[in-house]
């Protein structure tokens, strides 16, 4: 069975925003995967599953990002590209504590795993 881009994104969304499970997020990446967030406070780049697991776990413990997503008030639009290994997602995420985040994520996929994720977001606003 081939995993569609939408299915992979939904797994990523569930692991990160819904269950906040850093182990599950890291498992979606290739062993040498890269997660970077150039617009996050301080900007960062995590290379490899262990670094992704540790970095996502730390982000989930950061008070600026502790609100869980409210799926009923959130939405996304997934865009396929001419490159079958790349897709882009526009996200408007509402958090249970009312802040909202808008973001763009660019995914590069290899062997049904995320090889590179560039996540453009800033801290939630109230």
Image (spheres, rainbow, N blue to C red):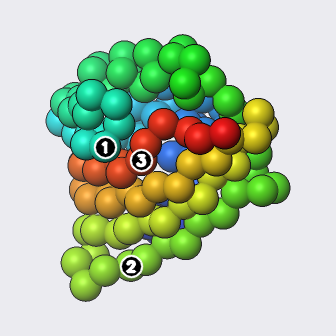
Residue at figure coordinates x 55%, y 72% from the top left: 77
Q: Find residue 121 and name its label.
A: 3
Counting residues from the start of the chain, the first of labels 1 and 3 encountered is: 1
Residue 39: x and y in percent read 31, 43
Q: CA distance from mark 1 to mark 3?
A: 6 Å
Find numbered disc 2 in the image and state the secondary structure of the residue it sits on.
Answer: strand
Q: Residues within 10 Å of mark 2 (few under 14, many from 20)?
A: some
- Where 4 sits versus 36, above or below? below
Q: Is residue 45 something one can see in this rendering? A: yes
Contact (Cβ within 8 Å) of mark 2 with mark 1: no
Find numbered disc 1 in the image and state the secondary structure of the residue it sits on.
Answer: loop
Q: Residues within 10 Å of mark 1 (few under 14, many from 20)?
A: some
Q: Nearer the viewer, residue 84 or 70?
A: 70
Residue 18: x and y in percent read 67, 38
Q: Find residue 12 and name its label.
A: none
Residue at figure coordinates x 69%, y 33% from the top left: 68
Q: Is residue 14 something one can see in this rendering? A: no
In the image, taking residue 82 as reference, residue 61 lies left or right, namely: right
Residue at figure coordinates x 38%, y 68% from the top left: 88
In the image, taking residue 104 as reference, residue 92 lies left or right, namely: right
Q: Find residue 39 and name its label.
A: 1
Find numbered disc 3 in the image and state the secondary structure of the residue it sits on.
Answer: loop
Contact (Cβ within 8 Å) of mark 1 with mark 3: yes
In the image, taking residue 120 as reference, residue 17 lies left or right, namely: right
> Label 2, on which residue?
80
Q: Nearer the viewer, mark 2 or mark 1?
A: 1
Query: Which residue is the extreme one toward the front?
Result: 126
Residue 104 quadrant: bottom left
Counting residues from the start of the chain, the first of labels 2 and 1 encountered is: 1
Residue 74: x and y in percent read 70, 57
């Amino acid at each position: 069975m081939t995993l569609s881009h939408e299915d992979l994104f939904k797994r990523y969304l569930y692991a990160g925003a819904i269950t906040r499970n850093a182990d599950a997020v890291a498992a979606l990446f290739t062993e040498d995967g890269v997660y970077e967030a150039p617009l996050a406070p301080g900007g960062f780049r995590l290379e490899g599953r262990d670094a992704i697991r540790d970095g996502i776990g730390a982000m989930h413990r950061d008070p600026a990002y502790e609100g869980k997503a409210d799926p009923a008030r959130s939405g996304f639009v997934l865009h396929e590209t001419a490159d079958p290994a790349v897709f882009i997602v526009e996200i408007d995420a509402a958090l249970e504590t009312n802040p909202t985040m808008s973001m763009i994520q660019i995914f590069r996929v290899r062997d049904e795993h995320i090889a590179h994720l560039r996540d453009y977001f800033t801290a939630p606003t109230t």
